Image (cartoon, helix red, strand yellow):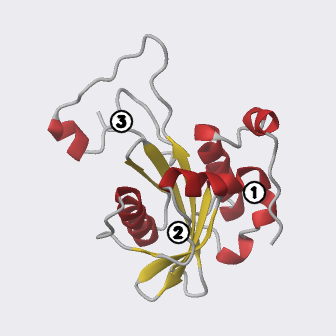
């Protein structure tokens, strides 16, 4: 596999870094599925994602677990190591890997995108269906969560709202899910 690295300025213009990378991956997933839900794994072409490869984890179903087949350079930097070959487990001592396992399980169960956050990082899980229609490949985009902008305030919401999955007033995450009132 050939991986093309974009110069930082060009990557930023093309939305290949930060939250723009997640939005780009979500648009790719939507197009690959043709608006009919989760796309088949034979519709995943990494050459179409060359500008976002640094932010990608590519996982394959390995029995009951998800095994990491590829980890981009930015993902490796965020984790502090190369997780290629590792199985995602919810019990992993690395908080991001544990949350990635939870996100992969939720996305595979519902066959729809799921977003998880851990330790200042955001991951978007995009399932691709195998022969029988169950998730066989998981494309995961991982970025450092952007810090609040100048003058922004971090608001604490009551615990009830967090359990209900709210994202604030009318917001939508990169997974396209609307927040609940």
Instruction: Looking at the image, tell me whether mark 3 or mark 1 is earlier in sequence order.
Output: 1
Q: Nearer the viewer, residue 12 or 104?
A: 12
Instruction: Looking at the image, tell me whether mark 2 or mark 1 is earlier in sequence order.
Output: 1
Relative placement, left or right, of 150 versus 17 is: left
Residue 83 - label: 2
Position of residue 8 measured from the top left corner of the image (x, y, whole percent): 76, 38
Q: Nearer the viewer, residue 35 or 68?
A: 68
Q: Can residue 15 be spotted in the picture?
A: yes
Q: Do the CB atoms of the residues marked 3 and 1 lie less than 8 Å apart?
A: no
Relative placement, left or right, of 157 versus 54 is: left
Relative placement, left or right, of 78 versus 116 is: right
**Distance (Cα) linking label 3 and label 1:** 28 Å
Q: Is residue 96 above or below residue 14?
A: below
Rendered residue at 40%/67% (across/down): 101
Please tell me whether mark 1 sits on a helix, a strand or a loop: helix
Which label lies toward us, 2 or 1? 2
Residue 49 - label: 1
Which label lies toward us, 2 or 3? 2
Give the farthest residue toward the front.
80
Q: Is residue 33 above or below residue 170?
A: below
Q: Residue under label 3, please give it.
A: 167
């Amino acid at each position: 596999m050939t991986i093309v690295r974009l110069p930082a300025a060009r990557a930023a213009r093309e939305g290949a870094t930060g939250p723009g990378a997640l939005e780009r991956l979500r648009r790719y997933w939507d197009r690959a599925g043709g608006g009919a839900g989760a796309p088949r794994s034979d519709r995943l072409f990494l050459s179409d994602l060359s500008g976002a490869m640094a932010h990608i984890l590519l996982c394959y179903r390995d029995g009951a677990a998800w095994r990491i087949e590829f980890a981009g350079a930015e993902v490796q930097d965020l984790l502090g190591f190369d997780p290629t070959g590792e199985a995602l487990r919810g019990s992993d001592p690395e908080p991001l890997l544990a949350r990635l396992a939870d996100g992969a399980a939720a996305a595979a169960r519902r066959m729809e995108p799921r977003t998880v956050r851990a330790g200042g990082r955001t991951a978007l899980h995009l399932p691709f269906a195998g022969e029988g229609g169950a998730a066989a490949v998981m494309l995961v985009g991982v970025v450092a969560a952007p810090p609040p902008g100048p003058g922004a305030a971090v608001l604490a919401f009551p615990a009830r709202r967090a359990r209900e999955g709210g994202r604030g007033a009318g917001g939508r995450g990169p997974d396209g899910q609307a927040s609940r009132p």
